[in-house]
Image: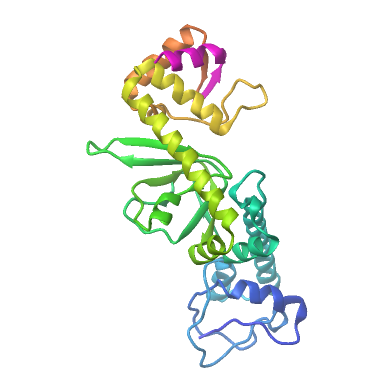
Amino acid sequence: MLIVKPVIGKPFFSFELNALIRDITPKITPVKATIIPKIGIQNVKKPRIPIIKATIAKFFDCIYSNFFDKNNVLKLFFINLQKKRMHIEYCINCLETKNSIFKVLTNEEKDMLAHSANTLEFKKNDFIYKEGYLPSGLMVLAKGKVKIFKDALNGKEQILRLANAGDFIGYRALFAQEPYNASASALDDCIVCLFSKDALYKTIYQNADFALQIIHFFARELGYAESNLVSLTQKHIRGRLAESIIRLAETYGFEDDNVTVKLRVYREDLANLANMTTSNAIKTLYNFKEEKVIDLDGKKIKILDYNKLERISRMG
């Protein structure tokens, strides 16, 4: 069995390996003792349980397959090291985002949260969390687009809201200390920063301004939820669809032409967001197109007359 640990006296690699090895863990078949001593890896005949995760899985896959070419292993090591550094930068950016709830934290508190964070990668259509599961920390979407939805009894999705880079997801269940009451999935490739629950609660206890920021955030989200409830229950199809298109534009913004919403949206997702059937959504979209309110380019929506779209939304 092989255990990986930094070798004392190898300053160039020891710090990086210490940072990586805290998170890494495969079981590897016995190999020769000549395995790349230059980068601080030693062969131990009777190791304890290896503490290794998937952060540098490809690196260990190379060892597992007995491909011991030093150049290949070094290359994989540096690729995964660079990837980890990039992910740490994502978490730091989440904490430094202007006008976020983290703006009142001290540098020491930000540093503590950053060190508690893990970065998670998701491909398009992957589940980020599922209804019924317990949260383990505060999720901040560092990159990508996400939909939060609930499955109805008839099997249809009801999209509750959309999230963009910098948004929090799954926070209600975390602070309510309950399982998730909805699911979240990636609309494109995403990176999520997961801040430790313990570190987050410790920061709340220490910093009253931070606790107040969280209360303000919840109050704004409650106002949004109330507005959305009114829209779904009182507005007609045209008003609901118009409001949903506006919400897409407000959440994701426009491309360089200032009319194309920066999201490829499926008709079914748009219907689920507006709480209507897909056929009604398609029909209403083409009505808006004939009225020159919007234009359609595949899965892209172009808003040609924003003021008119807002009037349709207000009138319901």
Q: Nearer the viewer, residue 87 or 63?
A: 87
Answer with left or right where residue 125 lies relative to residue 209: left
Q: Residue 191: in sight, yes or no?
A: no
- Which residue extends farthest front? 208
- In the image: residue 165, left or right of residue 98: left
Relative to residue 234, is residue 212 drawn left or right? right
- Examine the rendered structure and indicate whether residue 16 appears above or below residue 187: below
Residue at left 59%, top 54%? Answer: 209
**Where is 1 relative to 273, above or below?**
below
For the view shown, which residue lies furthest in the bottom direction?
A: 46
What colour-coding does the image apply? rainbow
Q: Which residues are magenta?
A: 299-316
Q: Position of residue 255 (x, y in %)?
A: 63, 27
Q: Position of residue 113 (x, y in %)?
A: 60, 62
Residue 300 drawn in magenta = yes
Query: Is residue 280 depicted above or below 98 in this figure?
Result: above
The image quadrant of residue 3 is: bottom right
Residue drawn 53% across and 45% down?
A: 189
**Res 66 seen here:** yes
Q: Position of residue 250 (x, y in %)?
A: 55, 29
Displayed quadrant of residue 303: top right
Left or right: residue 279 versus residue 112 is: left
At horizontal 47% and vertical 7% (from top left) the residue drawn is: 290
Q: Position of residue 228 (x, y in %)?
A: 40, 30
Considering depth in this image, is 98 or 296 the residue closer to the camera?
98
Does the magenta portion include 1? no
